[in-house]
């Protein structure tokens, strides 16, 4: 594909950004540890997707054709429409909410890149190696777009925005595009990027799932069109910056976005399935719970930065709303229960958490605003029934790059996800394959393990922890 000309200096950022992302991804995958990291991202997002089976909103949970080329990880069967498969997978990841992200990008590059890479690799019947490279390139492109564009406008949720470009980059790599072709594909995809409402998320509206679903589907569709010869277009980044973000991409984030080194090693992984803005409050609450019986808690106050302070709902009405409620997540931390699970069985765990959440107040502390996105500062103060006051604070959660999880800990979280009721039989074997299988393995041979319809109500055996991987060599052809 012939790249179109860009006349403005700031419009030249995208070619350099994409070229740098491709080079960074390839440099990462040229190392054994880099291959392990990309596989860890793949297994975590796969676990998120399959754990959502039986928990998707109506319409997204429709079973597919058992012979469909593209697996519907979160629903039985498959489809010959890669955009549909990508949409369902992306939505499923946000149902489980236990994914990865790059804090400084203010979003989740892997969410869109993974779903697009998986669907198109299967559609074109390509190998695990192709899938992992597409995931890595899409992740690097998405992360850099997030750094370049900066904070979304107030009220705009980041899903389906620059992530559309991440999806397009991943699908473009599967289609065999070079950096110039991926640049034009990403630029074209950004013309249909979304700027959906953030409030739907906090209020637990299922419309939230349309943002990752349709944003990723748009990226896949555009990439397929571009590979078929659809013409390139004028620069789209300035428009996306004006409409969905607080600044236009004029160089303020260019230095960060154009770094030569891979950014994926800076990613965080969540320890539980909730919004990352809630995790530092949860971290403090869990630490307090070691010496503080929850029945002794009278009131809780959480002071935090502006973006997190929006998540103040004391009475979340759905699983999604609970995942985006600091009162709920902090209450679960004090009780020692998982805040991100589906509706609990017939016991009093959720009722106890709901009662405790009623006593949690979230406040915006402007003095903490400068602490994000370098961290996610939260200060938690508990007043006990006897009048004592306990205070704790955190900037990072376990799983941030400043406090990383071990490979065994990452695998343990994956195993917990696979215990979600409804997870398909074969999911643990799929994760094992993504962790250990040689790169030449046909991806559809791995996903066939979950393409059937039988759910495993108790999950499966734990996946093998992500150790040194199938190869520690630097030879790209060996993995």
Image (cartoon, rainbow, N blue to C red):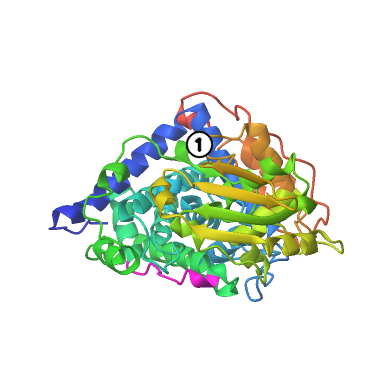
The quadrant of the rendering that contains the N terminus is bottom left
Q: Residue 76: horizontal and vertical position, in percent?
A: 71, 64
| 362 with respect to 455 (left or right) | left
> Who is closer to the viewer here, 389 or 334?
389
Whole-percent x and y of residue 341?
72, 57
Whether residue 129 is visible to the viewer of this picture, yes or no, is yes
Judge from the rendering whether residue 279 lies leftward or rightward of residue 372; answer left or right: right
SS category of the residue bearing label 1: loop
Magenta span: chief secondary structure: loop
Q: Position of residue 236 (x, y in %)?
A: 27, 64
Q: Residue at (57%, 47%) from the top-left corner?
A: 280
Q: Is residue 327 above or below residue 101?
A: below
The residue closer to the viewer here, 220 or 42, is 42
Q: Residue at x 65, y 63 (%)?
A: 322
Which picture quadrant has residue 472? top right
Q: Residue furthest top?
A: 473
What residue is at 35 percent from the left and 48 percent from the top?
A: 144
- According to the picture, the residue beneath numbered tag 1 turns out to be 401
| Residue 71 seen anywhere in this rendered image of the structure | no
- 473 or 405: nearer the viewer: 405
Q: Residues within 10 Å of mark 1 (few under 14, many from 20)?
A: some
Image quadrant assignment for residue 468: top right
Residue range (magenta): 191-200
Residue farthest to the front, as pictured: 387
Q: Residue furthest right?
A: 346
């Amino acid at each position: 594909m012939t790249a179109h000309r860009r006349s403005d200096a700031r419009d030249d950022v995208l070619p350099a950004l994409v070229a740098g992302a491709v080079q960074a991804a390839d440099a990462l995958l040229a190392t054994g540890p880099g291959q392990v990291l990309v596989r860890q991202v793949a297994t975590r997002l796969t676990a998120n997707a399959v754990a959502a089976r039986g928990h998707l909103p109506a319409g997204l949970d429709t079973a597919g054709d058992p012979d469909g080329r593209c697996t519907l990880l979160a629903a039985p069967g498959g489809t010959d429409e890669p955009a549909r498969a990508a949409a369902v997978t992306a939505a499923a990841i946000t149902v489980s909410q236990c994914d990865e992200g790059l804090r400084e990008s203010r979003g989740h590059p892997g969410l869109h890149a993974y779903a697009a890479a998986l669907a198109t690799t299967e559609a074109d019947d390509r190998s695990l190696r192709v899938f992992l490279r597409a995931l890595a390139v899409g992740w690097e492109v998405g992360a850099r777009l997030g750094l370049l564009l900066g904070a979304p406008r107030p009220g705009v949720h980041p899903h389906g925005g620059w992530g559309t470009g991440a999806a397009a980059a991943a699908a473009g790599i599967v289609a065999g595009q070079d950096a110039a072709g991926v640049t034009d594909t990403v630029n074209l995809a950004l013309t249909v990027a979304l700027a959906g409402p953030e409030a739907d998320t906090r209020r637990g509206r299922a419309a939230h799932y349309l943002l990752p679903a349709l944003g990723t589907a748009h990226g896949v569709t555009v990439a397929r069109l571009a590979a078929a010869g659809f013409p390139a277009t004028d620069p789209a980044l300035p428009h996306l910056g004006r409409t969905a973000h607080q600044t236009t991409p004029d160089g303020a984030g260019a230095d960060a976005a154009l770094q030569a080194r891979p950014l994926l090693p800076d990613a965080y992984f969540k320890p539980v399935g909730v919004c990352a803005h809630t995790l530092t409050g949860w971290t403090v609450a869990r630490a307090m719970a070691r010496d503080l019986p929850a029945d002794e808690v009278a009131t809780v106050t959480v002071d935090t930065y502006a973006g997190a302070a929006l998540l103040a709902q004391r009475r979340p009405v759905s699983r999604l709303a609970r995942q985006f409620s600091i009162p709920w997540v902090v209450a679960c931390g004090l009780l020692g229960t998982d805040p991100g699970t589906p509706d609990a069985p017939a016991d009093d765990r959720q009722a106890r958490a709901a009662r405790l959440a009623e006593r949690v107040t979230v406040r915006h502390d402007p003095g903490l605003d400068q602490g994000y996105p370098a961290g996610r500062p939260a200060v938690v103060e508990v007043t006990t029934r006897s009048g004592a006051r306990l205070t704790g604070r955190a900037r990072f959660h376990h799983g941030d790059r400043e406090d990383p999880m071990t490979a065994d800990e990452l695998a343990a979280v994956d195993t917990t996800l696979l215990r979600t009721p409804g997870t398909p039989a074969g999911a643990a074997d799929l994760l094992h394959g993504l962790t250990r299988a040689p790169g030449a393995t046909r991806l559809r041979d791995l996903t066939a393990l979950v393409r059937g319809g039988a759910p495993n109500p108790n999950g499966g055996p734990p996946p093998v922890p992500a150790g040194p991987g199938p190869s520690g060599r630097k030879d790209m052809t060996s993995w």
